[in-house]
Amino acid sequence: MDILREIERLKSDLKITVAAHYYQRDEVISAADFVGDSLELARKSAADPNPYLVFCGVGFMAQSVKILAPHKRVLMPRIACCSMARMIDGAGFDRAIALMNEAGIASGDIMPVTYINSQAEIKARTAKMGGMVCTSANAETIIRAALQSGKKIFFTPDRCLGLNLAKRLGVSAAVLGKDADLASKALIAFDGFCSVHQLFAVSDIEFYRAKYPNILIAVHPECDPSVVDRADFVGSTSQIIKWARSQPIAQPIAVGTEFNLVNRLRETNTFVLSSTKPECPTMNETTLRDLLGVMRSIENETFMNEIDVEEEEREWAKIALDRMLSL
Ligand code: 13P
Ligand code: SF4
C-alpha cells in the first residue's frame, strides 16, 4: 500500500489537515499540509478551516490549538510529551509562588510568564495572576512587556530561556530553589530545562571553532547560557532556519538545536553542534504509519488520541495565549 497516497485520500475525503513541527521525522514532514515552529503552528492550525486537525508534534502544541480553537477536533498520531512541559504541574506552580511569598515577594507583585512548552493548567494559573504565554520566537517582546508592569517576572518552566532573556535585556535574574535573595531580582526562573538542548556544550563550540576557524554558530535559546554566550546567532526554530538559509552556501555553520531540523537545513557546510545525535525522543516517535492510523480512526469514528482540555482551564489558558498573540 502507498501510505502517502492513502493519507492524501483520507485528508480530502474527511477534511483533515495535518500539521507538523519542524522536529518531526522527514517522512512525517512529507505528509504535512504545513510545517512550523510552535508559534506558527498555533496560529495556522487555529485558523485552518477543516474540522479535523492531526497534529504531529508534542502534547502542549496540540493542546494550544484546542485551547485557541475549541470547535476543532484535534488528534495526535501518538501522545508524545515534551519532557520540559512535564517538569511543572499546577501544584508545583503553587509551591513556587509560595516559595516566592516566603522570600518576601507578595503574590500581587508577581507577573508569571510561561513558555508555551507547558501544560494547560500552568497557562491557566498564569492568566489568573495577570500573566501571559511566550514562545522562543517572541520571548523578548513578551518579557519586555511584562517588565513594564513593574512586577517581578516568574518565568516558567525553562530556566535557560529565562536566564538568557534576562541577560539580553540587562535585568537581574535568579533560579528558584538554587539562588538566594530572590526579592532583589527582576526575573525568577523555575528550574526546568530541555533535555535535548542541554546536550550542547561549550566544548562543542570550542571543537568546531578550532576545526573551522571561520565557522558561524547558531543555537536555540533553550541552550545553557554558557553556550548561548559563545554563539554568533541565537534564535527560535524559525529564526534559525531563516538565518541559516541566508548564509552563503560556502559558509560553514554549526547549529545547536534538534537533529531532524538541522539535518534538513542546508545540503552542505552544515554541522550539528554536538558529538551526539540530539533528537527529541518523543518528537521522533511519530511515524507515517502512526499518522495513517490516527486518520483511519477518524474514518471509523473511534477518534484515537483526541486532545481535550477541561472547559474552565481552557478559558483561562486561552486568556494567557491571547495576551501573547495580541502583542
Ligand atoms: P519552537 O517554539 O522554536 O518551535 O521550539 C519549540 C521547542 O520545543 C524547542 O525545543
Ligand atoms: Fe520539549 Fe526539548 Fe523536545 Fe522541544 S526539544 S519538545 S523543549 S523536550
Image: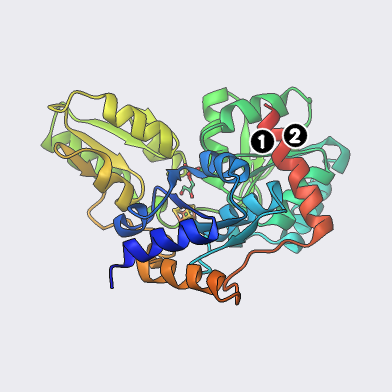
Give the left or right position of residue 50, taking residue 285 as reference. right
Give the left or right position of residue 74, taking residue 200 as reference: right
Q: Nearer the viewer, residue 201 or 16?
A: 16
Query: In the figure, 4 relative to 322: above or below?
Result: below
249 shown above or below 292: above
For disc 1, the marked residue is 187
Mark 1–mark 2 distance (CA, rounded to whole Å): 6 Å
**Which sits in the foreground, 254 or 313?**
313
Residue 118 image position (x, y, % from top left): 63, 53
Label 2 belongs to which residue? 152
For residue 204, say whether it is visible.
Answer: yes
Residue type highlighted by circle 1: Leu
Q: Quadrant of the C terminus?
A: top right
Q: Secondary structure at mark 1?
A: strand
Q: Where does residue 110 sit, x and y in percent of width and height?
A: 79, 38
The answer to whether residue 186 is seen in the rendering is no
- In the displayed structure, does residue 224 sit left or right of residue 251? right
Q: Quadrant of residue 73?
A: bottom right
Decide: marks 1, 2 in contact (CB < 8 A)? yes
What percent of the width, then of the height, locates residue 195? 44, 58
